[in-house]
Amino acid sequence: AKSTGKTFLVIYHAPFDAMNETASVSPEQQAAGMALWEAWAQRCGIKLRDMGAPLMNGKRLAAGNAPTPSTREVAGYSLLTAEDWDDVLSLLEGHPHISGLNPDATIELHEKIEIPGM
């Protein structure tokens, strides 16, 4: 079944050092963390269009300049389908990314705007 509604881009932010720390966690800690994400995905059901993935090594591009390292601390993304902002916010309640493991971790949301004819 396919979910209907608006599409929201979920962007996960975390300090770069927090991302580097995750590389050194034990397999048990990694499994426990993944279990939280899997539980969240199960709760979202078909509204989770794309679980996404971790992101690293971002580049910033500007006209006439060579690419430079991004300073935005983007840690990953997901895509959700929801009826409205209340619906998408309810899907993100208790999300593992903002569970308190890193106090500087945040989630940013953007609604996809449909452009007629595209």
Image (cartoon, rainbow, N blue to C red):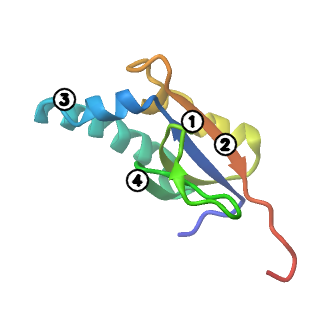
**Disc 1 marks which amino acid?**
Leu
Q: Nearer the viewer, mark 1 or mark 2?
A: 2
Residue at position x 37%, y 40% from top?
37
Instruction: Sort mark 1 into few (<14), some (14-19) or many (20+) by Cα contacts within 10 Å.
Output: some
In the picture, the disc for residue 109 is 2
**Disc 3 marks which amino acid?**
Gln
Residue 43 pos. (x, y %): 46, 43
**Vertically, is 61 above or below 22?**
below
Q: Secondary structure at mark 1?
A: loop
In the picture, the disc for residue 92 is 1
Residue 85 pos. (x, y %): 75, 41
Residue at position x 54%, y 39% from top?
71
Q: Can you identify the residue that label 3 sits on?
A: 29
Residue 87 position by quadrant:
top right
Q: Nearer the viewer, mark 3 or mark 1?
A: 3
Residue reaching furthest bottom? 117
* 3 and 4 marks in contact (CB < 8 Å): no
Q: Secondary structure at mark 4?
A: strand
Q: CA distance from mark 3 to mark 4?
A: 18 Å
* 1 and 2 marks in contact (CB < 8 Å): yes
Q: Nearer the viewer, mark 1 or mark 4?
A: 4
In the picture, the disc for residue 53 is 4
Instruction: Sort mark 2 into few (<14), some (14-19) or many (20+) by Cα contacts within 10 Å.
Output: some
**Disc 2 marks which amino acid?**
Leu
For the residue pair 43 and 59, the one nearer the viewer reads as 59
Instruction: Sort mark 4 into few (<14), some (14-19) or many (20+) by Cα contacts within 10 Å.
Output: few
**Disc 4 marks which amino acid?**
Ala
The C terminus sits in image quarter: bottom right
Considering only order in the chain, which callout, 4 or 1, is on the residue closer to the N terminus?
Answer: 4
